[in-house]
Image (cartoon, rainbow, N blue to C red):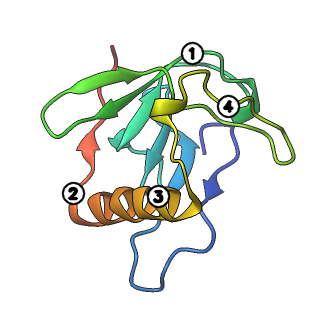
Amino acid sequence: INDRSVFRKLGLPSEGQMVYLLYNEAGQWAFTPHADGRPDGWAFVADPAESPSSIVGNFSIWDGAAWVPDTTLKLNSPGDVVEADKDASKQPSSIQEAEEAAAIVAAASAEAPPAPVTTL
């Protein structure tokens, strides 16, 4: 779509909403439930990168009321090793905490309708 590949999240529950990463009609890489390229989703970055691993801009996420920058949302190529955040208080201290945080994010994205993505 829009001369870029479309990526789909694997391993979602069968009743879960699909999650795609694609380059939408507004010229943004976006996380969205729609595979057709419409500017709609949960997070976006206005970056003309040819592939997700080349994105250098910061994503903005929908917080339920407005688009807010999120400098912590990063994409990595498969196999990349990411250095942990220096502020350990922001990191889960156990696998259980990480799983609980992932479950909260999954539940929120399943319940919340995607917000329209707007160009900043």
Where does the image place residue 74, in percent across and percent down from the top left?
Answer: 60, 31
Please, what is the three-letter code of the amino acid marked with disc 1?
Gly
C-alpha separation, residue under disc 4 versus residue under disc 3: 16 Å
Res. 104 in view: yes
Q: Nearer the viewer, mark 1 or mark 4?
A: 4
Residue position marked by numbered label 3 in the rendering: 97
Please identify the quadrant where the C terminus is shown. top left
Q: Nearer the viewer, mark 2 or mark 4?
A: 4
C-alpha separation, residue under disc 3 versus residue under disc 1: 29 Å
Label 3 neighbourhood size at 10 Å, few (<14), some (14-19), many (20+)? few
Residue position marked by numbered label 2 in the rendering: 112
Query: In the image, which disc is placed on residue 57?
Result: 1
C-alpha separation, residue under disc 1 versus residue under disc 4: 20 Å
In the image, 112: left or right of 102?
left
Q: Nearer the viewer, mark 3 or mark 1?
A: 3
C-alpha separation, residue under disc 3 versus residue under disc 2: 22 Å
Lower position in the chain sequence, tag 3 or tag 2: 3
Q: Are marks 1 and 4 in contact (CB under 8 Å)?
A: no
For the residue labelled by badge 3, is the local secondary structure a helix, a strand or a loop? helix
Residue position marked by numbered label 4 in the rendering: 84
Q: Are marks 4 and 3 in contact (CB under 8 Å)?
A: no
Q: Nearer the viewer, mark 3 or mark 2?
A: 3
For the residue labelled by badge 1, is the local secondary structure a helix, a strand or a loop? loop
Please, what is the three-letter code of the amino acid marked with disc 2?
Ala
| 39 over 69 or under it: above or below | below
Residue situated furthest right in the rendering: 79
Q: Residue at x 69, y 34 (%)?
A: 52
Q: Are marks 3 and 2 in contact (CB under 8 Å)?
A: no
C-alpha separation, residue under disc 2 versus residue under disc 1: 25 Å
Lower position in the chain sequence, tag 4 or tag 3: 4
In the image, 63: left or right of 119?
left
